[in-house]
Amino acid sequence: MTYLKQSLEANAFFVLLSAALFFFLSGYGLIETDADHPRALFFVFYILISSPLQEFLFRSFLFAEMNRAGIKQPSVQIFVSAAVFSFIHIIYFDVTTALATFAAGIVLAAIYRKYPNLAGVSLAHAAIGTMAIIAGIARTTA
């Protein structure tokens, strides 16, 4: 697989930074981690299906389509990918989630642009998303 090692390394660094941020925010009471958590079956679905599918759609497929359409500027590709990725998370009706997914989308898109490998971004998405859900972010309250 092309760029697998580089993608995994870059994404692992992003996951570690995200984990440190969640730890910091939780330590200062800025996010609440003691809310009800989804059932284990949800996490199986999220890690094995949802995260890889989202990464395929908003990185692999979208980048290929932008390239095919002649949109090849890295900053435009990264911004469009992050914006669309963030937009699908509007279902949470939460500004924090929208901003967090846009920021994560920027990083994931930049990593994917540099090291186009679906495995790395899918694993990072699954890890960071799981942390966010456990932290009470990216979870509906209704």
Image (cartoon, grey):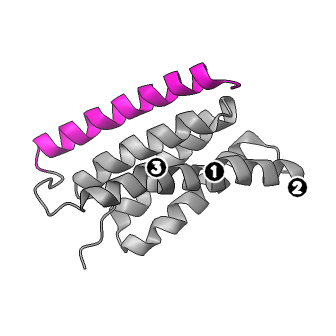
Kindly identify which numbered label has been placed on residue 69.
2
Whether label 1 touches label 2, CB < 8 Å: no
**Which residue lies most toward the bottom here?**
142
Q: Amino acid at mark 3?
A: Leu
Element under disc 3: helix
Residue shown at the point (55%, 58%) measured from the top left: 85
Q: Nearer the viewer, residue 134 or 101?
A: 134
Mark 1 crowdedness (10 Å alpha carbons): few <14, some 14-19, many ≥20: some
Mark 2 crowdedness (10 Å alpha carbons): few <14, some 14-19, many ≥20: few
Question: Reading the chain from its start, which is encountered first: label 1 or label 2?
Answer: 1
Q: Position of residue 110 (x, y in %)?
A: 61, 37
In the image, the segment drawn in magenta is 1-29
| Rendered position, 16 above or below 54 | above
Residue shown at the point (24%, 74%) measured from the top left: 141
Of badges 3 and 2, the one in the foreground is 3
Question: Reading the chain from its start, which is encountered first: label 3 or label 2?
Answer: 3
> Is residue 5 in the magenta section?
yes
Q: Nearer the viewer, residue 60 or 108?
A: 60
Q: How many marks?
A: 3
Q: Amino acid at mark 2?
A: Ala
Element under disc 2: loop
78 sits to left or right of 21: right
Q: Which residue is mark 3?
A: 48
Q: CA distance from mark 3 to mark 1?
A: 13 Å
> Is residue 89 in the magenta section?
no
Does residue 128 appear anywhere in the picture? yes
Kindly identify which numbered label has been placed on residue 56.
1
Q: Amino acid at mark 1?
A: Phe
| Magenta-drawn stretch, dominant element (helix, strand or loop) | helix
